[in-house]
Amino acid sequence: MKRIFPFLIGYLLFVFACSDKTEKSPVDPELRAIADSMQQKYLPDRRVDVFDVEIDEVDGKPVLRGATTLPEAHDELLALARKERPEVLDSILLLPDTALQGRTYGVINLSVADMRVKSGFASEMATQALLGTPVRVLQKGRWYRLQTPDRYISWAESSTFQPMTKEEFNEWIVAPKIVYTDYYGFSYQKPDEKSQTVSDLVYGNILRLEGEEKGFYKVAYPDGRQAFVPKSRVLKMEKWLTSNPLTGESLVKKAFTLMGIPYSWGGTSVKQLDCSGLTKTVFFMHGVILMRDASQQVHTGEPVDISAGYDNLQAGDLMFFGKKTEDGKEKIRHVGFYIGNKEFIHEAGRVKVSSLDSTKTNYDEYNTREFIRAARFIHAVGTPGIWSVADHPWYKVQP
């Protein structure tokens, strides 16, 4: 029996595997080619829009399935597909999904919300969003597909944010706010730091201001929870927006306050950072929003000529590291701040300072060899991919 049992298991696995293969419908190559061409045309960066299209066949008819945020891509795809196969059925979901019943706005509800590439805790981390960040709700599944103000699209569990209608969102927007400016701390049930905590807080968290009491601000969370925070650890929103003028020296100074924070893929908060999370966080401390990834940030700002060396670099410039591919394109993998004297501060295992000078003990040979681009941002706010919080449309009343 011990010899027969493994044989039966192997035979059954073989039968089931063969059955799976025979039940799958063939994908129409012409329709697949059309869908791929639409993706290349309308979706140069899949991190900021959605065009997930699959092709099935039901009862002999091809079916386009999936979801997209690009109605023009959907319309052109359907027209070309039906020109090839007039019987094509359209089952593509246009986002935001009407099943959300108008609750297509939201505000992050946790001090730091983890957001992932796919729905589910087992999926790779994509980014993080801070308490008070406005989001757009695109799709509801097991988790929610959200878009943050830097246009990044990822998935978040329902407890991370408060979904809202436009009217509810506008009520939140017009209410007075405070910004938490300490790096770590808590809110409390009473105006007393010995009372029960309501939640943790980190730099950049935004809460609705409800009143003042005994050296505390009374605040409200997006989901309606109320708490108290020490006035000494926050600024009113309008004051925060002008409290850190954007200069190269200020960028470097703020970056140094994050020294030693450990690396975590997808991290964009003072709790944990990746390389572009460091640059994003430092700029957000100045009321400025950057694109999420280094490979996106590299296409923004004012280019700095480094063809003849490092003399054109100024403190606060972003340095981009990577390789040039065989077709002449660049593959950016890392970013940091130039701080002067041929040194840069970056997130690499932890936030630290490295040197471009081979005679220094902190010389970084690997990144020096792959330093291929630099950009200046201090006079570029308002240009594509660089927003001030004060002027970003998602922080304003929605028409």
Image (cartoon, rainbow, N blue to C red):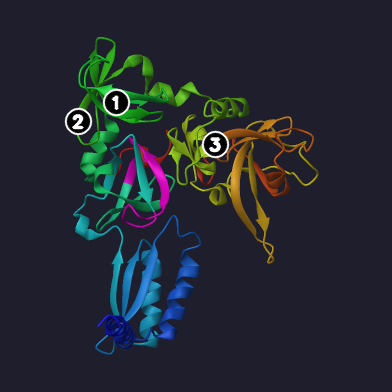
Which element carries disc 3, helix, strand or loop?
Answer: loop
Q: Look at the image and tell me in which quarter the N terminus lies.
A: bottom left
- Give the crowd class for mark 3: few <14, some 14-19, many >=20 residues within 10 Å: some
According to the image, label 3 marks what residue?
Answer: 350
Residue range (magenta): 117-135
Q: Is residue 230 above or below residue 341?
A: above
Residue 237 seen in the figure: no
Q: Nearer the viewer, residue 305 or 397?
A: 305
**Within the magenta stretch, is there residue 133?**
yes
What element does badge 2 sit on?
A: loop
The residue type indicated by label 1 comes to Pro
Q: Position of residue 248 (x, y in %)?
A: 62, 29
Earlier in the chain: of badge 3 and badge 1, it is: 1
Q: Position of 88 compared to 270: left or right?
A: left
**278 vs 123, nearest the viewer:** 123
Q: Amino acid at mark 2?
A: Arg
Circle number at residue 176: 1
Name above or below for residue 241 compared with residue 392.
above
Label 1 CA crowd tier, 10 Å (few <14, some 14–19, many 20+): some
Q: Is residue 65 above or below residue 331?
A: below
Residue 371 magenta-highlighted? no
Q: Nearer the viewer, mark 1 or mark 2?
A: 2
